[in-house]
Image: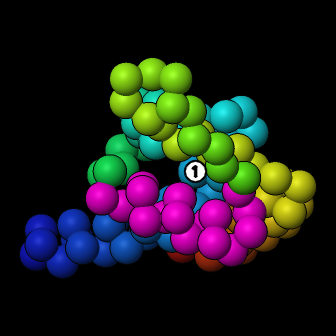
Amino acid sequence: MDQTVLNNMITELRRGTQIISVLSQLKKTQYGYSLLQTLEQKGVVMEAGTLYPLLRRLESQGLLKSEWDTTESRPRKYYLLNDVGLDIYDQLIKEWKQINKEINLLIEEEM
C-alpha cells in the first residue's frame, strides 16, 4: 500500500469537512486561536494557515460578522455566525446528513 497516496486522500476527505467544522463552532464568538484550540479539543486538527484564510473567505461571503477587540495588548478579531451564516450552516448540515446516509448505504452494500 502506498502510504503517501492514502495520506493525500485522507487530507482531501478532511478538507471537505473544514467549513462545517468551523461554522459549527461559531455560534458563539471566537477569535482565530481560540477557535483552533476548541477544534483541537474536539479532535479536529487544523493548521492556522488553513483556518485564517477560511475565516476571511467565510466573512467575505457574508456568513460571519466580525469585530476587533483592541482592549488587550494584542488586538484580536472575533468572529460569529450571522443570520445568513446560521441559515447556510443549517442547510449544510442537512446536506451532510444526506451525503452521509448515501455513503453509508454504499459502504454497507459491500459488507
Whether residue 95 sits left or right of residue 78 in the image: it is right
Q: Nearer the viewer, residue 105 or 68?
A: 68
Please report the bounds of the magenta region as a residue range.
49-64
Whether residue 8 sits left or right of residue 102 in the image: it is left
Q: Quadrant of residue 2?
A: bottom left
53 part of magenta stretch: yes
- The image position of residue 72, as x and y in percent, is 45, 22
Q: Badge 1: few (under 14), some or many (20 or more) residues near its Cα, within 10 Å?
A: many
Q: Which residue is mark 1?
A: 22
Helix, strand or loop at mark 1: helix
Q: Is residue 70 visible?
A: yes
78 part of magenta stretch: no
- The image position of residue 109, as x and y in percent, is 62, 73
Q: Nearer the viewer, residue 22 or 33?
A: 33
Whether residue 98 sits left or right of residue 9 in the image: it is right
Whether residue 75 sits left or right of residue 81 in the image: it is left
Task: Point out the image quarter for the N terminus.
Answer: bottom left
Residue type of the residue flagged with mark 1: Val
Q: Residue at x 12, y 68 (%)?
A: 3
